């Protein structure tokens, strides 16, 4: 006789499958009396006999990577590949779980996240507050890479890893100012992600260090459309009364759009306007290896995330942790040492 499924046990008791999973996995959210009923029904249906007969087999666990647009950049794919590699070494499978970029009324999380198929979740490249809240409410061990400014770590109910940026952008901006580049702009959506906001704060910190105030004329910090970055940045640059000495960009992704704008319009052919970025992303050939940036290493990020989910799965009552991974600044061009 085959082992009964959790759904069959749930149907026999007229309860949900997730309730059966919680009861059999000793998770919170189920009363003692209902937990007893579930165990009794599971025993009657032969669930535990099948479990005992399978004890000699090696147990394989599964972790979900919940991610929006993993194909959007090699950066994300390298992180995911390293997570899979590290988890495999611990006999843990990786399941891709795709999420939408924006929440729509009626949306529910993919079934593998709610039916007991996975034991933990790593959340990547997800910047919709309602979807993050749905993930935070899952009764599973969770690790998040970044969050949105409106969702502090206390609301995520899981570990949170940041790529440190405030101190690094402060150092880059201070070097610009120290070398006489005083008319500075900042470009990047600072409400999109907490890491973006931190990088903007680093920019402001450096200006404060030099008793300067940001010039709003040269700063573009509002929301950008998912697929209209270049058009919106181009319109912003079109209406500038003059160009600044330098643009501090929230990422290499943003910096490459500015360089593309310059190239298409024949502006600054000798690159006197300094661009700085973040990530050291080699995908953007018009700026790769030529602008000052931060050498974020996706494989290191992937390994950190894998280690964290393994820890929280093994220590379910441990306090949540917020941590930062720092990187080296790569000074190039006008800012080279």
Image: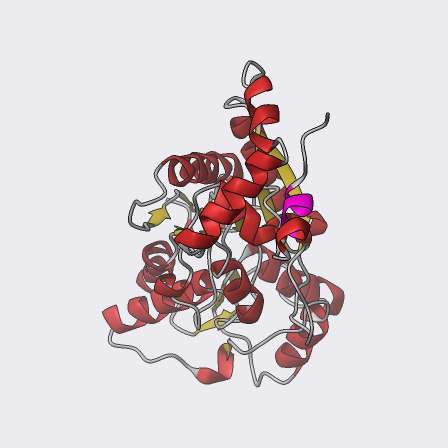
Residue 307: image quadrant is: top left
Q: Nearer the viewer, residue 233 or 108?
A: 108
Counting from the top left corner in percent of width and height, residue 151 is at 43, 68
**Residue 154 on the magenta span:** no
Counting from the top left corner in percent of width and height, residue 289 is at 57, 43
Position of the C terminus, as image quadrant, is top left
The reply, left or right, for residue 209 in relation to residue 105 is left
Number of disc labels:
0
Is residue 219 at least partly visible in the picture? yes
Q: Is residue 7 above or below residue 131?
A: above
Q: Nearer the viewer, residue 287 or 121?
A: 121
The reply, left or right, for residue 326 in relation to residue 259 is left
| Image: magenta residue range | 6-10
Is residue 180 at least partly visible in the picture? no
Q: Is residue 182 above or below residue 67?
A: below
Q: Is residue 210 above or below residue 7?
A: below
Dominant secondary-structure state across the stretch colored magenta: helix
Residue at 44%, 60% (x, y): give it: 195
- Of all residues, the one furthest to the right in this rendering is 264
Counting from the top left corner in percent of width and height, residue 217 is at 49, 84
Q: Nearer the viewer, residue 117 or 277?
A: 117
- Of all residues, the one furthest to the top in this rendering is 56
Position of the N terminus, as image quadrant, is top right
Residue at 54%, 64% (x, y): give it: 134
Residue at 33%, 49% (x, y): give it: 323
The reply, left or right, for residue 325 in relation to residue 263 is left
Residue at 47%, 34% (x, y): give it: 303
Counting from the top left corner in percent of width and height, residue 53 is at 59, 18
Colour mapping used in the image: secondary structure
């Amino acid at each position: 006789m085959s082992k009964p499924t959790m759904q069959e046990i749930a149907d026999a008791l007229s309860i949900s499958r997730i309730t059966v999973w919680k009861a059999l996995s000793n998770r919170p959210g189920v009363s003692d009396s209902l937990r007893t009923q579930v165990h009794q029904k599971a025993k009657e249906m032969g669930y535990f006999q099948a479990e005992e007969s399978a004890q000699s087999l090696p147990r394989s666990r599964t972790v979900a990577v919940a991610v929006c647009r993993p194909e959007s950049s090699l950066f994300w794919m390298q992180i995911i590949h390293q997570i899979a590699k590290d988890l495999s070494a611990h006999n843990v499978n990786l399941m891709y779980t795709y999420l939408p970029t924006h929440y729509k009324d009626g949306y529910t999380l993919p079934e593998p996240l709610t039916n007991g198929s996975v034991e933990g979740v790593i959340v990547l490249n997800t910047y919709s507050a309602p979807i993050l809240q749905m993930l935070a409410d899952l009764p599973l061990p969770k690790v998040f890479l970044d969050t949105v400014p409106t969702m502090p770590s206390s609301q995520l109910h899981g570990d949170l890893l940041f790529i440190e940026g405030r101190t690094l952008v402060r150092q880059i901006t201070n070097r610009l100012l120290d070398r006489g580049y005083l008319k500075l702009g900042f470009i990047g959506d600072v409400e999109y992600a907490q890491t973006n906001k931190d990088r903007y704060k680093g920019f402001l910190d450096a200006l404060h260090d030099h008793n300067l105030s940001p010039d709003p004329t040269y700063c573009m910090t509002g929301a950008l459309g998912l697929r209209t970055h270049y058009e919106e940045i181009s319109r912003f640059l079109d209406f500038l009364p003059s160009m600044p000495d330098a643009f501090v960009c929230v990422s290499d992704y943003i910096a490459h759009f500015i360089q593309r704008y310059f190239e298409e319009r024949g502006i600054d052919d000798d690159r006197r306007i300094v661009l700085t970025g973040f990530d050291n992303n080699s995908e953007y050939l018009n700026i790769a290896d030529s602008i000052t940036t931060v050498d974020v290493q996706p494989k290191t990020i992937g390994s950190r995330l894998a280690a964290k989910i393994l820890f929280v799965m093994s220590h379910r009552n441990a306090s949540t942790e917020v941590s930062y991974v720092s990187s080296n600044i790569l000074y190039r061009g006008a800012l080279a040492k």
